Image (cartoon, helix red, strand yellow):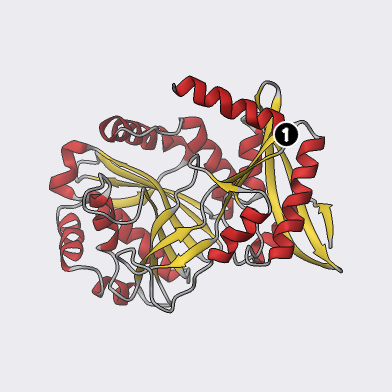
Amino acid sequence: MQFILLEPEEFRKFANKSLYKSFYQTPEIAKLREQNGWTAYYFGVKNDTKLVAATMLVARPTFLGKSTYYCPGGPLLDYEDAALVDFFFKNLRRYARSHNGWLLHIEPYYELRERDRSGEALKGGFDHTEALRNLKSAGLTPCATSDEPKYAFVLDLNHRTPDQLFKQFKQNTRNLIHRAEKNGVKVRELSREELPVFKQITESTSHRRDFQDKPLSYYEAMYDLFHDKDQVKFLVAKAPDGTPISVAMFMLYGDEVTYLFSGSDEKYMKEYNAQYLIQWHMIKHAAEHKFKRYNFYGLQALPNESKKDYGLYTFKKGFASDNQGHVTELIGAHEAPVDSIFYALHHFLHKLKHR
């Protein structure tokens, strides 16, 4: 096997065909990171002449002048191939070590176990725990810090028409969609110039629900990088008088539509239920354009009535019948020391700070 540097377009061709692709592993996200002070690299592994693994990797000084090397949504490889995992990460860490690195952090888009809509592991379903053992053998350990959720709720579209999908929504979900339509709510796509409307609603929602919103510059950059490729959509729902009452952002990449961010004006939520109509609008689009999966994205943990995001989970599963929707579990974020002295020093200082 050979560990090689790749050109961005060479990487893109591999990523487009990968079973483990994610919009996070694109040259566009590399450009976004570069706008924020990161440096992007592309690496691959060839077995004879065939490219069998690749990653977009970004680096930035984060600790005493030493750099963190970060793989958002990657790397893209078969994590159950022990020899490939060992070879790939040994060389990736070697490169980072020789280029002022102290830490390697990865967040693969690679499912761990097959689960049902309630989050229970399916008997006879796939189980990729071998991937965890291979990562451990390659010197990587699980970590809690992650930009991407470990769990998500996914609707399998499976070539169904919008009408077929709608009939399998839960009755309450169908009723709320009909109510929003009857009350005159309309959904349309926002232009770049209208993104401050999107930001205003997501920011107010973030204050209400206690999460950190992205800056307007992030939404504008994502629009600039992905909109001409028809890979991002910012939707708004408006009340009959034209007031924006709900917004959502979606990524359209590969076989999957991903519901990424949203917000709603609290004053109009119970009367109009506009977020249901936005989801239905986008699910129709996904079905009409032959996407295979509709990813409702993050859950903080496996479904549990005692968790504060359980209501969000019930909202999402209302769009799926028992045989369509399921919870996905990824193998999760992992990290490995690149410079063992700096890595140990960082952990010592971190523990000291928390004490």
Compared with 264, 170 (above or below) is below
Q: Which of the 4 quarters of the picture holds residue 20?
A: bottom right
Residue drawn at 24 percent across, 57 percent down: 314
Compared with 197, 90 (above or below) is below
The residue under label 1 is 339
Q: Which of the 4 quarters of the picture holds residue 210?
A: top left
Q: Where residue 191 appears, x then y in whole percent?
A: 45, 42
Q: How many marks?
A: 1
Describe the element under mark 1 as helix, strand or loop. loop
- The reply, left or right, for residue 61 in relation to residue 97 is left
Q: Where residue 22 appears, x then y in whole percent?
A: 57, 56
- The reply, left or right, for residue 75 in relation to residue 152 is right
Q: Could you tell me the amino acid type at mark 1?
A: Asp
Q: Residues within 10 Å of mark 1 (few under 14, many from 20)?
A: many
Front residue of this view, candidates 29 and 301? 301
Query: Do we see residue 21 in this rendering?
Result: no
Front residue of this view, candidates 121 and 206? 121
